[in-house]
Amino acid sequence: MLVLGAGPGGYSAAFRAADLGMKTVLVERYANLGGVCLNVGCIPSKALLHVAAVTDAATAMADHGIAFGKPKIDLDKLRGWKEKVVGKLTGGLAGMAKARKVDVVRGFGKFLDPHHLEVALTSGDGQEQTGDKQVVKFDKCIIAAGSQSVKLPFIPDDPRVVDSTGALELTSIPKRMLVIGGGIIGLEMATVYSTLGTRIDVVEMLDGLMTGADRDLVKVWEKVNQPRFDKVMLKTRTTAVKAQKSGLKVSFEGDNAPAEPQMYDMILQSVGRSPNGNKIGAENAGVAVDERGFIATDKQMRTNVGHIFAIGDIIGQPMLAHKAVHEAHVAAEAAAGQKSFFDARQIPSVAYTDPEIAWAGKTETECKAEGIKYGKAIFPWAASGRAIANGRDEGFTKLLFDEETHRIIGGAIVGTQAGDLISELCLAVEMGCDPVDIGKTIHPHPTLGESVGMAAELFEGVCTDLP
Ligand code: FAD
């Protein structure tokens, strides 16, 4: 088994294949295993978001009678801590690969034909090629080569213009930053930088932020986060960026464009990610790649070439680590001859902002678009003892159920720790729970998780003594 790429998809596939008894080779260009997620994505961003959340919470304590001084920021130490978190996890992966006798080959892989991959060996952090090549012969292959940030063509090459990877490097704290793209990644980074003291503008072409989430959830987030931003420019686009000594001069066009160009010390481009399908010589192996770089698969993650599978960001949306891992297990098991296939009813999404927004299964927007007759129950956290005690009762928990089958088809939470709380709803959707199943389950009191049980009890017929 050859696995190309050692992100969450690739390392999970390699480990499962090795556990199933296959002789496994894992090809990765970078020194560390873990891909985007562990090195420059999920994990470092959450390490910094944790610091931001604790800092903001400490500042908010003044309202509760405990005042701390103004936070003193030691950027080197903060960066060091983030790197330690990443190192702990990537080091752990190297140990797990070794324990399973997965042969890790460090280099950039390209298919030569349907059974051979040529690897241009790399050294250092993975940027330099040693000039040596190694050809790996394989019976089966799982492509997990991931994705990379999209760059806007008119934006100059300038160290003050960064993508999420550059923003996570945390080389300085700019005074004014423009975030291009109001999706989850952009707004998570905006949260970190604004807590560190940066004034932030956001520009978004669409008519809302985090457009995958229902608007009622985003509204709560917007109310809390208003002070973080100088301007949120919806239905607006950047048209030109001029790199000047004094800063980056940005022109805008659209419904909320400022009349004059604006100056920024830093620009974060977070306008999406594009798959790496066109960079791996897939055509030599006969693997079909579409014009955007995505590779199509069936439910066993098999490409159009029977012994070659593909998983993770490279096969499509949603580009999320937990989706990649799940697909990885299916692909490795299918390659080993098991009857596994991908049949998830829900893939949860979480914005680890403050408050967090999390949703699983159908959103209301999707229900409406698909003509599903749905009912909903919303439990406001203003009635949650724990949320009130935490001083964070702005959120709510929402459950959606199918009016015909009475099964839970979706749910969403906005509030602190929503990302952790959503798991119960993931299980509910996956198992096709009736709201009664949740409403009659005893939840611990006083917890935020209780809000899921309370929302379920609001469904008609579950608990008649409630409004
Ligand atoms: P990747 O992680 O992209 O890994 C692909 C690997 O393949 C890379 O290591 C790359 O070097 C290697 N590679 C590519 N081509 C070759 C080649 N030809 N030869 C050798 N090696 C190659 N997802 C979540 O679920 N939760 C989050 O909180 C979250 N936060 C994120 C925050 C940020 C800032 C970003 C950018 C992403 C975040 N994501 C998050 C998305 C998540 O990181 C990706 O969905 C996930 O990493 C995809 O895994 P993958 O295995 O498909 O690919």
Image (spheres, grey):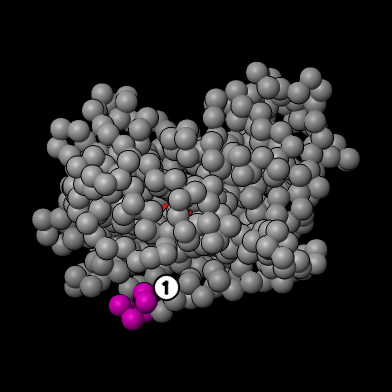
User: Is 104 on the left-hand or right-hand side of 37?
Assistant: left
Q: Point out the stretch of residues depicted in magenta.
A: 96-101
What is the x, y in percent for residue 97?
Answer: 36, 74
Which residue is at 60% across, 53% downward?
A: 165
Which residue is at 34% across, 57% downward?
A: 423
Judge by depth and name the residue closer to the eye, 91 or 31.
91
Q: Is residue 211 above or below residue 281?
A: above
What is the x, y in percent for residue 191?
Answer: 64, 50
Q: Give the overall secondary structure of the magenta segment.
A: helix
For label 1, count other residues whose C-alpha is less than 10 Å away and answer few (under 14), some (14-19) or many (20+). some
Q: Is residue 334 above or below residue 363?
A: below
* Image region (quadrant) for ligand 1: bottom left
Which residue is at 64% across, 72% downward?
A: 81
What is the x, y in percent for residue 84?
Answer: 59, 74
User: Is 89 on the left-hand or right-hand side of 337?
Assistant: right
Q: Quadrant of the C terminus?
A: top left
What is the x, y in percent for residue 257?
Answer: 71, 22
Query: Mark 1 — residue?
Result: 93
Residue type highlighted by circle 1: Leu
Residue 429 appears in the figure: no
Q: Is residue 336 above or below residue 283?
A: below
